[in-house]
Image (cartoon, rainbow, N blue to C red):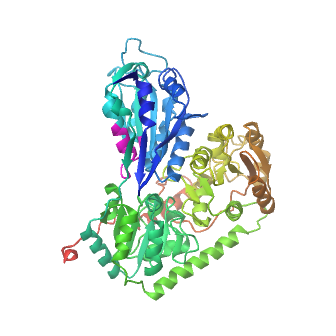
């Protein structure tokens, strides 16, 4: 038995946790991010002070530190993460957004927020939210709906059974996400005789569950019967390390592939069977072949509304689904044939049953044609030579100057959609998009996490002015820790993505420009403002100087040639470098599919009325995809 505090016990336990997959062992926690306050400074803070081997990292914002941990876990294929600790109250609730992001994206992170006094005699303590109907209630209860596991330790001995459950969920490929362990501040400092075995090295084996053989047999039969099969590669393809297995299957069979945001990079962009992005932000070829497909083979995808174009994309009335997924919840979506298994193993076993199978020659050639045509269009967009720098040119410059093994990271605004279409992925980790939660502010903090996970690679952060203004402070952390980022800060003076969506809905980009209020009508206005008038109303904010004030090296570029030079120079700098550019907010990329955004049914605006009528027509294409997955004859 060892008599130590709860805070000390937590740190001692966490530093001894390892994971192993395919015979490779690695430490699960890379350390702890935290901001100390009265809710954790004397408990967990003291424990971290006495255990320097479990490295503590200082950050500037509690939400940001969760983003950093999530990005680290994404690059590590969910085989590692960070602990994030905060004080009670606002420090804790600042992490709720990050918690939701991790859970939505199925990525592990451990949050340890400080909590109220378990003994209650001094309540209400500073920053405590009181309740008239329960005394066992705090702001930390906000984490329950966004956590995969939630616990509050009111007695030291509860830690003995809670900590293994924490690790069980974090290391589960099917159930992982945010784990929240609430530690009342008095309990953190309380001593207890813990069993010594609790602090011995522990290895959590990450298995590769094999698929049910009867279902694999049926899946291979369905593929043989199909005339227009299509693979949707999701994030699980990459997390499981199934990219090589996928390539082997596609090389021989010729089944075309489309990729989700999380799955982009499952095949290199120039693979002849890679149609690129699918769904709302899909390429013309990807959308065309998805509409015609009679069989969708989803690998590690959760089928977000962007992937399915709000359930309107797959138009073939005979379409069926085979879903390969480690999570049963996702495997059963769309009345699919559910293959609940590790993606790598399942693809390999499916491949072994299709050794003599090939798609029709014309179908294969159609995919190759789409691949080449879209790559040609990408080249045109990369070199459009517009009077003002475009977002497509920015993406092209970063893509062409970065190395294949580098990491590009983005999350919110109009940039992710264009990146999904335009980025030429050359490595499974070359394209890093957080689009499950599409969280503004993720980019710079996430870039730090990606760099910490892969310090040998350059990390290029693409961030718009909207996201930058929400959460840019981790520039300081990157400099403090010596993790250099190349940040391309794109200023289009507002929320360009929602501005475009607003225009499509008939509301003229209302409230999406960063402008002085118009004295004529009292409105902030939108994209109906003439460009000359808009420029006179731009706010006197200098984002480049702001980045410089945070310690970054700042370069500016006003055309593609200058941007390319700045990127080359940034690769040679010694610390985080911000490249500031301004782009034309209206010069976008064509060909976006429909997305279900409800429109006002009644309006005085003719533009809104027209948009609503179009909306009604689009909804007619939506489907629930209820075709039964298995029939009696399938078992014959």
Residue at the (60%, 79%) spot, across then down: 372
Compared with residue 194, is residue 475 higher up or lower down, i.e. above or below? below
Residue 379 in view here: yes
Q: Is residue 414 visible?
A: no
Where residue 105 appears, x then y in whole percent? Answer: 46, 51
**Number of numbered discs present?**
0
Report x, y in % for residue 275.
Answer: 53, 73
Q: Quadrant of the C terminus?
A: bottom left
* Front position in the image: 291 or 172: 172
Q: Is residue 170 left or right of 94 when viewed as pictured?
A: left
| Residue 299 image offset from top left, x and y in percent | 41, 65
Q: In this view, does 569 lie above or below 153?
A: below
* Res 158 → quadrant: top left
The magenta region covers 164-178
Residue 69 drawn above or below residue 374: above
Q: Is residue 177 magenta?
A: yes
Picture layout, residue 196 above or below residue 560 = above
Q: Which residue lies furthest to the top in this view?
A: 121
**Residue at 43% across / 50% down in the picture?**
106
Residue 617 among magenta residues:
no
Outermost residue, bottom side:
361
Q: Which residue is more in the foreground, 196 or 166?
A: 196
Question: Residue 187 placed where, x, y %?
Answer: 39, 21
**What's the residue at 46%, 40% (across, down)?**
99
The part of the image, by quadrant, that contains residue 193 is top left
Position of residue 502 in the picture relative to residue 343 (left or right): right
The N terminus is located in which quarter?
A: top left
């Amino acid at each position: 038995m060892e008599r130590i505090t709860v805070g000390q016990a937590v740190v001692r336990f966490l530093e001894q946790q390892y994971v192993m997959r395919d015979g490779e062992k690695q430490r699960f926690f890379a350390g702890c991010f935290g901001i100390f306050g009265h809710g954790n400074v004397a408990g967990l803070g003291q424990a971290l002070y006495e255990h320097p081997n479990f490295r503590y990292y200082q950050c500037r914002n509690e939400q940001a530190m969760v983003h950093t941990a999530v990005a680290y876990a994404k690059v590590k294929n969910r085989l590692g993460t960070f602990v994030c600790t905060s004080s009670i109250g606002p420090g804790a609730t600042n992490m709720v957004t990050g918690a939701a992001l991790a859970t939505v994206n199925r990525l592990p992170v451990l949050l340890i927020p400080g909590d109220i006094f378990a003994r209650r005699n001094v309540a209400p303590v500073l920053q405590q939210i009181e309740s008239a109907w329960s005394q066992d209630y705090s702001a930390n209860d906000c984490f329950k709906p966004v956590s995969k596991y939630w616990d509050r330790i009111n007695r030291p001995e509860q830690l003995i059974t809670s900590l293994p459950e924490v690790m069980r969920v974090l290391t589960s490929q099917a159930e992982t996400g945010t784990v929240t362990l609430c530690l009342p501040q008095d309990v953190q400092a309380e001593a207890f005789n813990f069993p010594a075995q609790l602090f011995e090295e522990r290895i959590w084996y990450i298995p590769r569950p094999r698929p049910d053989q009867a279902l694999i047999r049926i899946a291979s039969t369905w593929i043989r019967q199909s005339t227009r099969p299509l693979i949707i590669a999701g994030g699980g393809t990459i997390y499981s390390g199934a990219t090589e297995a996928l390539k082997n299957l596609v090389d021989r069979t010729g089944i075309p592939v489309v990729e989700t945001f999380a799955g982009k990079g499952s095949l290199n962009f120039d693979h002849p069977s890679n149609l690129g992005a699918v769904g709302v932000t899909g390429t013309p070829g990807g959308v065309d072949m998805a509409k015609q497909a009679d069989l969708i083979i989803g690998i590690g995808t959760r089928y977000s509304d962007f992937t399915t174009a709000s359930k309107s994309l797959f138009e073939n009335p005979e379409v069926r689904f085979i879903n390969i997924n480690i999570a049963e919840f996702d495997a059963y979506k769309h009345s699919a044939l559910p293959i609940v298994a590790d993606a790598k193993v399942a693809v390999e076993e499916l491949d072994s049953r299709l050794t003599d199978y090939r798609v029709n020659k014309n179908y294969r050639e159609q995919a190759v044609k789409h691949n080449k045509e879209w790559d040609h269009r990408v080249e045109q967009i990369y070199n459009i030579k517009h009077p003002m720098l475009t977002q497509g040119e920015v993406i092209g410059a970063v893509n062409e100057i970065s190395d294949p093994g580098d990491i590009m990271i983005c999350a919110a605004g109009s940039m992710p959609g264009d990146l999904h279409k335009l980025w030429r992925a050359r490595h499974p980790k070359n394209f890093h998009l957080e689009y499950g939660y599409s969280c503004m502010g993720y980019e710079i903090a996430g870039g730090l996490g990606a760099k910490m996970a892969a310090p040998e690679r350059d990390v290029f952060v693409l961030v718009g002015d909207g996201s930058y203004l929400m959460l840019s402070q981790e520039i300081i952390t990157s400099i403090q820790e010596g993790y250099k980022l190349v940040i391309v800060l794109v200023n289009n003076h507002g929320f360009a993505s929602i501005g475009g969506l607003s225009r499509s809905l008939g509301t003229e980009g209302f409230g999406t420009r960063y402008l002085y209020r118009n004295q004529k009508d009292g409105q902030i206005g939108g994209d109906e403002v003439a460009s000359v008038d808009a420029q006179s109303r731009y706010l006197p904010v200098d984002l480049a100087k702001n980045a410089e004030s945070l310690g970054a090296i700042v370069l500016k570029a006003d055309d593609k040639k200058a941007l390319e030079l700045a990127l080359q120079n940034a690769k040679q700098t010694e610390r985080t470098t911000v490249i500031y550019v301004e782009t034309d907010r209206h010069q976008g990329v064509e060909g976006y599919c429909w997305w279900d955004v409800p429109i006002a049914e009644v309006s005085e605006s003719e533009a809104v009325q027209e948009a609503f009528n179009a909306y009604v027509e689009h909804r007619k294409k939506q489907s629930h995809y209820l075709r039964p997955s298995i029939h009696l004859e399938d078992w014959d």
